[in-house]
Image (spheres, grey):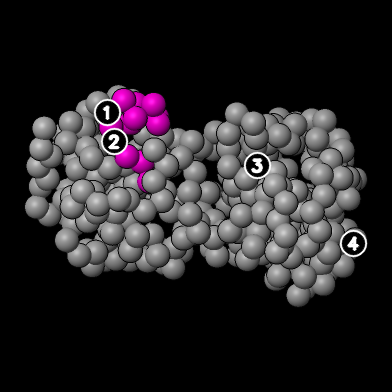
């Protein structure tokens, strides 16, 4: 059966958008893009029946969503991880799924570095204290370290660690990393994961969430980490056993954590992790910068053109 697309293609961008982002979307040529907040199911149900392309962000793209979009011809992940897309349902319908490797690497690398520094220098605690009228807190100032001179362990060595590792070296860090395959041109020394956990002052996670990596940082892994070490996670919350992490941080076994992702998202404000003073948190925004959006929209729009023209797609997953 010949596929007939709307002209221009109707794209549902499944995320909330502020004024700047809406302006950027309006400037993408050849597409009719509507931003639909992830918590507005009524809006989504209204848009899906005539949706040609879904630009997926984080809220799971389920089999039911795919079934409710009879005109759907492409699921374009705005980002890299496709663990929140029902790939089997897409494959059954013959709907290609594409992602955007590398487009958010710089943004995530910068936030990973920010979380390392904020955790080591206790920035959120000083910020809160100063706003409350506390200028000098000898107990909080006691024992503050520097990132320079520390051993930083990068778990994974894809696009983000490739940007992050040279910066860490320039700051005076020793970089070690664990990866499934040899990386001959890497900055840093490749070691087994267990060696990395035992040696690193800072462990930063940069792997996708798969059955193999789910809860790879569990209670035994946390116990192997260096006493007082810092864990940074800008990848996926499911990589970490969050209850075990809370216990390790609360007991003082770990020194601190910088977290942009959580086991359940949106995160529950009552989650015990938010009660810990030695945790720096951000709401899964490592990837969100104007640079990320500009790079992402350029490739996503090209894939929309290609799917309409019947041409091979960029970064096709299935």
Q: Which mark is residue 95?
A: 2
- Using the numbered discs, state the Cα–Cα distance from disc 4 to disc 3 in whole angstroms: 23 Å
Among the two numbered marks 2 and 4 on one chain, the one whose residue lies closer to the N terminus = 2
Q: Residue at x 84, y 40 (%)?
A: 194
- Using the numbered discs, state the Cα–Cα distance from disc 2 to disc 4 in whole angstroms: 57 Å
* Label 3 crowd (10 A; few <14 / some 14-19 / many >=20): some
- Using the numbered discs, state the Cα–Cα distance from disc 2 to disc 3 in whole angstroms: 39 Å
Q: Is residue 25 above or below residue 82?
A: below
Tell me where residue 163 sits by quadrant.
bottom right
Q: Magenta part of the protein: which range?
A: 86-98
Can residue 117 be seen by looking at this rendering? Answer: no
Dot 1 lies on which element?
Answer: helix
Instruction: Report which residue position mark 3 lands on.
Output: 274
Instruction: Report which residue position mark 1 lands on.
Output: 93
- Using the numbered discs, state the Cα–Cα distance from disc 1 to disc 3 in whole angstroms: 41 Å
Where does residue 303 sit, x and y in percent of width and height?
29, 54
| Residue farthest to the bottom, as pictured | 170
């Amino acid at each position: 059966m010949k596929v007939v697309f709307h002209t221009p293609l109707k794209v549902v961008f499944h995320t909330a958008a502020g004024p700047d982002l809406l302006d950027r979307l309006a400037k993408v040529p050849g597409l009719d893009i509507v931003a639909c907040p992830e918590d507005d199911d009524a809006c989504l149900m209204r848009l899906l029946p005539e949706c040609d392309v879904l630009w997926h962000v984080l809220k799971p793209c389920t089999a039911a969503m795919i079934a409710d979009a009879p005109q759907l011809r492409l699921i374009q992940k705005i980002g890299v991880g496709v663990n929140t897309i029902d790939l089997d349902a897409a494959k059954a319908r013959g709907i290609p799924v594409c992602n955007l490797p590398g487009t958010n690497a710089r943004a995530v690398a910068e936030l990973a570095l920010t979380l390392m520094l904020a955790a080591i220098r206790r920035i959120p605690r000083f910020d809160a204290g100063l706003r409350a009228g506390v200028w000098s807190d000898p107990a909080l100032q006691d024992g503050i370290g520097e990132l320079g001179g520390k051993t930083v362990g990068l778990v994974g060595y894809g696009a983000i660690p490739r940007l992050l590792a040279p910066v860490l070296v320039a700051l005076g860090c020793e970089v070690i990393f664990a990866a499934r395959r040899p990386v001959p041109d890497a900055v840093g020394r490749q070691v087994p994961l267990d060696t990395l956990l035992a040696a690193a002052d800072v462990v930063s996670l940069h792997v996708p969430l798969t059955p193999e990596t789910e809860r790879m940082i569990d209670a035994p892994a946390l116990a192997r980490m260096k006493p007082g070490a810092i864990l940074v996670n800008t990848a996926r919350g499911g990589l970490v056993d969050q209850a075990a992490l809370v216990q390790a941080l609360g007991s003082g076994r770990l020194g601190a954590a910088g977290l942009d992702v959580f086991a359940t998202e949106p995160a529950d404000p009552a989650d015990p992790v938010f009660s810990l003073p030695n945790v720096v948190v951000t709401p899964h925004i490592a990837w969100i910068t104007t640079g990320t959006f500009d790079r992402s929209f350029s490739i996503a729009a090209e894939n929309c053109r290609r799917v309409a023209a019947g041409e091979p797609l960029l970064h096709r997953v299935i």
